[in-house]
Amino acid sequence: MELAIHTDVSANARVNTQGHTSKPHKVTAEGVNVFYGNKQALNQVNLDIPSNMVTALIGPSGCGKSTFLRCLNRMNDVVDGCRVEGEINLDGENIYARGVDVVHLRARVGMVFQKPNPFPKSIYDNVAYGPRIHGLAKSRTDMDEIVMTSLEKAGLLDEVRDRLDAPGTGLSGGQQQRLCIARAIAVEPEVILMDEPCSALDPIATAKIEELIDELKENYTIIMVTHSMQQAARVSQKTAFFHLGELVEQGDTMDIFTKPIDERTKAYVTGRIG
Amino acid sequence: MEHEHIVSSFDEDLGRLDSIIAEMGGLAERQLADAVDALSRRDVALAKKVIASDKQIDLLEEEIDNFTIRVLALRQPMAEDLRAVVVALKMASNLERIGDYAKNVAKRTLTLSAMEPVGNATQTIQRMARQVQSMIKNVLDAYGAHDLAKADDVRMRDEEVDLMHTSLFRELLTYMLEDPRNITACTHLLFVAKNVERIGDHVTSIAENVHFLVSGDKPTDERPKNDLSSQTIVE
């Protein structure tokens, strides 16, 4: 079997943390391996994600960070030939265990993608879609309440209050992304995964999303993949650095960006390897 | 770090910071040597040269100020690079102060040269200055070579400077008690001694910054201090 990665690497990433967090871990990953056919994309990843914090996953393209993110709500299940080994626990329960309802899991672990992808529906229906299929609203009044609250939490309500029937695709890129965040939080998730949520946005729209992420962490656990190290530094409290399918180093964001331990982390954050 | 930046002009920027600091450090070291040399040889011309040369250090500090702001704004350095930029900024400020103290020694030399010499005080000052000079040299070497042990060694050596300062303080008080006509010269010499002692403190601060540059942490252990001049009574 052809392996993209040699397997004799250390199973344990460097842990770079001075200030110990007392927050409990919302998600824990143990010995996670991911294969696309014969190609191994992740090798023995162990990572604990604390509750109510923003954890940034960084690393060069192809390092496995998005693959890891997609493991957390079993998005890889839909990829042909993808095989996930190891254990990923949400509140201590293995999400890969037999009998886990994947639809329910994805309601608990929501996702926001790189490119804003609103449904070709009205703003209102974009947000109402999830609660409707999960049966979260008993009445039209209930649904109105959910939609308005979600738009409010996503920092979009003031901009769309008087045009809820307009198509979501008519909004600006930044507004569309906040609509997608409203759509994700409408089903009351516990964890929100974000895969480069600002890479298609201008700096102002990016700042709004970053401000929003900072507010959202009060109520949700957020895990974000980003190519912008400045963004990881600005919005996250924890950072994990991936390289060639391996989790190299993880710790407090401040430590990763001021005094990384591993040579590969040093080289990456200072712009010496891409 | 062995690897170079993907953006090679970033390496040039960091290299330039290093070379300005090295130039400043060399100048500061020489200014102190010349100032104390002028003092012990009562060389007015050399003292005047020291006073005039301080401007060069000031200009280099300004260059570091502007350049570090530029690097921070345009490169947004991280990790070791970030520490290098912040440390260069702080070191430049320390070196500029060292230059100022050397200049002050030179100014007092102009006054002292017009007066009768007092005892062996200038020799003690010279010994103290030699110690501080070697600390400056070593801390600059430690900076250039990212040598943690050497930086820590410099940090510990300030204690000896403090001891010499305390003993000099007693010596000068004694001269003043012996003969009130010594008071003017001794007061100037007290300031000279204090200037050299303060230079030692700035070198120590640079050593702590080099420690941070190399390791990412500030030194945590207590540094031995022995300047008891503030509590000294001679009766």
Image (tube, coloured by chain):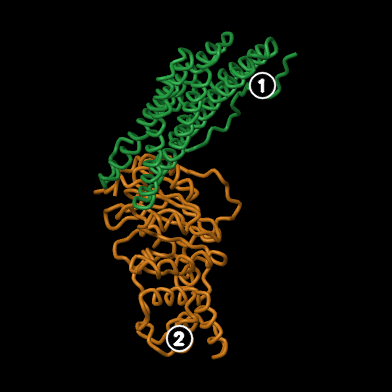
Chain colours: A orange, B green
Provide residue A155's location: percent of width, then percent of height.
49, 75
Residue at image mark 1: B228
Residue type at mark 1? Leu
Who's the residue at 26% across and 47% down the image? B7
Provide residue A262's location: percent of width, then percent of height.
40, 40
Who's the residue at 31% across and 38% down the image? B16
Residue at image mark 2: A124
Which label lies toward us, 1 or 2?
Answer: 1
Q: How many marks?
A: 2
Numbered disc 2: secondary structure: helix
Q: Nearer the viewer, residue A47 or A216?
A: A216
Determine contact: label 1, label 2, CB under 8 Å.
no
Is disc 2 surrounded by few (<14), some (14 to 19) or many (20+) residues within 10 Å?
many
Is disc 1 surrounded by few (<14), some (14 to 19) or many (20+) residues within 10 Å?
few
Q: Nearer the viewer, residue B60 or B86?
A: B60
Provide residue B40's location: percent of width, then percent of height.
48, 13
Q: Nearer the viewer, residue A99 or A20?
A: A20
Q: From what the image shows, is residue B14 above or below residue B229?
A: below
Numbered disc 1: secondary structure: loop
The quadrant of the picture occupied by the C terminus of chain B is top right
